[in-house]
Image (cartoon, helix red, strand yellow):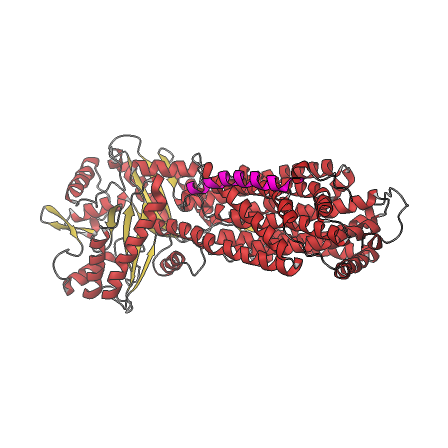
Amino acid sequence: MKTDTLPAWLTKPGILLILLSILITIIAAGMQNLSFRGDYRIFFAEDNPQLQAFDAIERTFNKNDNLSLVIAPPSDELFSRQYLTLVRDITEAAWQIPYSTRVDSISNYQHTQAQQDDLLVADLIDKFDSVTQEQVQQAKAVALTRPELVNRLVSFDGKVAVVNVTIALDDAEKTAQANEIEAFSKKLIAEFQEQYPEVTFYRSGIIMMNYSFFSSAQQDSSTLVPLMFLIVLIVLGLMLRSITAVITTFVVLIVAITSTLGIAGWLGMAINTASVNVPTIVMTLAVADCVHIIASMRHGLSQGNNKLQALAFAVRINNKPVFITSITTAIGFLTMNFSDVPAIREFGNLTAIGVIFAWLLSISLLPAMLYFLPQKVTQQSARQLEQQGMARFAEFITSRAKPVLWISVILIAFATGFIGQNKINDEAVKYFSVDNEFRQAADFMAERISGMATLSIALDSGAPGGINEPTYLAVLDQFSTWLRAQPEVNNVVSLSDVLKRLNKSMHGDDQAFYRLAPERTLGAQYLLMYEMSLPYGLDLNNQINISKSQSRVMVVLENLGSTEMLAFEQRMNTWLAQHASQYHYLASSPSLMFAHIGERNMKSMLTSLPLALILISALLIFALRDWRLGTMSLLPNILPALAGFGLWGLISGEINLGLSIVASMTLGIIVDDTVHFLAKYQYAKRQGNNAAESVRYAFVTVGKALWITTVVLVAGFSILALSDFRLNSDMGQLTALIISIALLVDFFLLPAFLILFDRQYTSEAHNENLVRTTA
């Protein structure tokens, strides 16, 4: 075995290590610039139409981020002197929460009463005096009959209350401010918990969702990455039985990850719930490169070659396959740039960078370290035993190629048949596991009060003061009535309800006058009188704009999936087109934004998938310089994803944001096994062997490496399944499933297919068993 094929930079490993150390230190220094970002806006680009509508609504009215403090007395009787006092006290204390601009509850609800010719507006429960039994009865009578309160600030059965805190966050500091609010509110609730140990408290709302995004990312980075390191070291130690292999691979993994994160830091990126997976995935993919180099070197050493010769052999025989697999994997991740989700684009780009780093390090740093560190060569007998095991498996496949092929095709067709059971469905609340505090609070609210899904509709009258026009108010009232009749709707807050209540109060609280004022001037006077009576922080700026040309209808819905949310939006748009076509409107909310992004992201990823397939196939054909093998490679590259998504239809059937990228991502990863198998197969064919013998050679030389890399890949992505964040856990589960199927395809269907259909013999010079020639 000649050494002149060893790359020039590997002939001086000492100098190479010094240069690499300097370069890596500079790159990794960028990690000091990294930060965490955990708010939901990481999923939406600035040009997202729903985000633009949401921002426009917030600019017109006010910020709508909220923190919901839920109070559930054990007796299921909220309306008592004790627990109404608790609601009042928490309401007052909640004003101290950082960045709060408004606090709403049944205790400070601005109740209107007629007092001769005057309008009396006051808190439903007095702030200062002790709560009397008379106040309890009045509060219950009012709270359970006001449409703006029931299923928003109090449950319909009067057993649970909500204190809703409106928060105004700085977009640039959302994560830090959400963390500050979470810490303050946690301490606040703990203080009341001491006074009322029998009461159950929950915290929900957009603020807690933002905090959960952040905490999930931090938890994954602090637990899953170390766990993945441990799994990799154990697997490598058991399968390669070499301390040197474990140490060198560990160093390559550390350097690949720190270099990738360093680049992220230099580029000013922030780690989020998507990109937090980059270290785990880069680590997983880097192991695959290292295993092939180490396995080939150990094979060379077992043949009696010295260390330098074995290194030359390992680099030469793996340089092309490792390069191809790295490029194809990078292409798969780079196709995520077609996604509408910025977080997914950053995740794809960073992982692609990490894959390229892993490739460069596997052909430079890894051989240099292997040269200096001692190698314990596998004994010839042990090596032969491994080869014999693979040889026997190869013999099984080659002697039963036809039934193996048919059984494989039938099983894959069966699995793929369930692919139609998958449905695109995103529900932000269910992104978190049932053990998550925010998820538990949201589930409790959905069961006892209302869902967390919201929708804001800003209806523009078209003229200053136009909200007082009877025609506009009539449409607004009809729209509010229609909304309340929808099965998904839990609560509606509308200006028309305020004006009907005011008209009733100004007529001696006569229920017959619970209707809109017949004249514009009269309604405008009522509204002005009411606004002047409202205390600071409880005005109507969250419902009407300054020029009184627009009003906002705020809808609380059940926790809908994206399909149901989009169906509701379509029905709403149809009603408005039929009954309010003269008015312009904007409708948006975080819930609606998530509903749309899932659908659009899936469409964009399905568009990019054919492009990735074409690029990868063209690269394989060019690299293998054989259009037949390049075309045949399509089979083992496409079928695993089809079968995997089919089985997912049986397992879950829900496709969320995390799963929408799996097809493109796995397409690049599973090429690894195919390329290495076909490269060894092609090498044997060019030595003059037929298809069956070439399949045997491929199994004997690369079979174990493929097995090891698949175990590591499956272990790595299975680690993600432990994530508290469902987008990550679902992605990990499905990716691990597809990679497992890919190995089965490469071990059964691909070799059987090659034996039966690759009939072109280059020579009959070698008709003896190649296992003996390579042993």
Q: Main secondary structure of the magenta part?
A: helix
* Vertical order, 389 against 13 (above or below): below
- Residue 520: % across, % down: 21, 36
Q: Is residue 80 within the magenta segment?
A: no
Q: Quadrant of the N terminus?
A: top right
Horizontal relation, residue 767 to residue 483: left or right: right
- Residue 106: % across, % down: 23, 55
Q: Quadrant of the C terminus?
A: bottom right
Q: Is residue 14 within the magenta segment?
A: yes
* Vertical order, 546 against 370 (above or below): above
Res 721 seen here: no
Q: Most extreme residue toward the left, as rendered?
A: 116
Q: 336 or 4, which lies in front?
A: 4
Horizontal relation, residue 680 to residue 324: left or right: right
Res 60 seen here: yes
- Residue 184: % across, % down: 28, 53
Horizontal relation, residue 539 to residue 281: left or right: left
Image quadrant in which you'd find residue 334: top right
* Range of magenta residues: 11-34
The residue positioned 15% from the left and 55% from the top of the image is: 127
> Disc count in the image?
0
- Residue 437: % across, % down: 38, 58
Q: 15 or 300, which lies in front?
A: 15
The residue positioned 73% from the left and 54% from the top of the image is: 703
